[in-house]
Image (tube, rainbow, N blue to C red):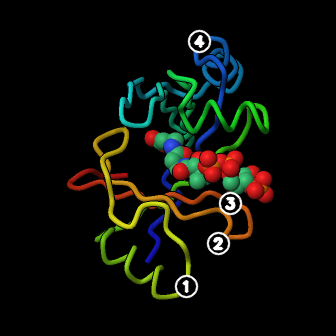
Amino acid sequence: MIKKVDHIGIAVKSIEKALPFYTDVLNLPLIGTEEVDTQKVKVAFLQAGSTKLELLEPTSEESAIAKFIEKRGEGIHHVALGVDSIEERIREIKEQGIRMIDEQSRPGAGGANIAFMHPKSTSGVLFELCEKKGMKG
Ligand code: CMX
């Protein structure tokens, strides 16, 4: 059902300030940056071997990332699991009694379709399902 950990989301106050650690100290290649208006975030993807790290900077105080940083500070925000047939996966997960934040997938960064599970249903981890149609990795 799960192909791999597609990426790990990390909440930061400023991508500009956080990025040199990833690119210069860890030497991770920057894949690209993007603004996701629907989520009120700016993101930067870095390649980390066969998976990726996603830096998430809030672009509005109403952003889930702004709330997260205010409450918990900067740090790991979510784990994204790569799947095929995301709507089917959502249905199967709901059938197991897990609460989905998104009962249907919606567009996310990098042209992916995404859906989040509620951390209250998963022992405290915010998991994202992530389907990339026609894209490898
Ligand atoms: N990981 C684990 N637990 C989390 C969490 C996270 N990232 N964010 C919030 N929580 C916990 C809170 O600590 C809180 O627990 P307690 O009640 O024990 O304190 C509980 O979940 C409810 O959280 P809250 O602070 O009251 O915040 P909200 O209910 O307003 O929102 C959540 C929480 C997860 C439902 C919301 O952030 C959400 O819908 N997230 C999905 C969308 C998202 O994260 N978008 C940004 C990324 C977009 C992208 O990757 O493109």
Q: Is residue 50 left or right of residue 68?
A: left
Q: Is residue 38 above or below residue 121?
A: above
Three-letter amino acid code at the position of disc 1: Gly
- Label whose residue precedes the other's in the sequence (4 or 3): 4
Q: Which residue is mark 2?
A: 121
Identify the residue shown where x is 53% and y is 33%: 63
Which residue of the protein is positioned furthest toward the front in this rendering? 62
Q: Secondary structure at mark 1?
A: loop
* Marks 2/4: CA–CA distance: 34 Å
* Front in this rendered view, residue 4 or 77: 77
x, y percent for residue 130: 40, 57
Q: CA distance from mark 2 to mark 1?
A: 8 Å
Which badge, 2 or 1, comes first in the chain's sequence?
A: 1
Image marks 1 and 3: residues in contact by CB distance under 8 Å: no
Residue 111 or 31: which is nearer the viewer?
Answer: 111
Residue 22 placement (x, y as % from top left): 64, 24
> Toward the viewer: 54 or 115?
115
Determine whether 4 is above or below 52 in the image.
Answer: below
Residue holding disc 4: 16
Residue lying at 64% horizontally and 37% vertically, measured from the top left: 10
Q: Nearer the viewer, mark 4 or mark 1?
A: 1
**Label 4, label 3: how far apart the Cα atoms are:** 26 Å
Identify residue type, mark 2.
Ser
Residue that carries the numbered disc 3 in the rendered image:
125
Disc 2, disc 4: CB below 8 Å? no
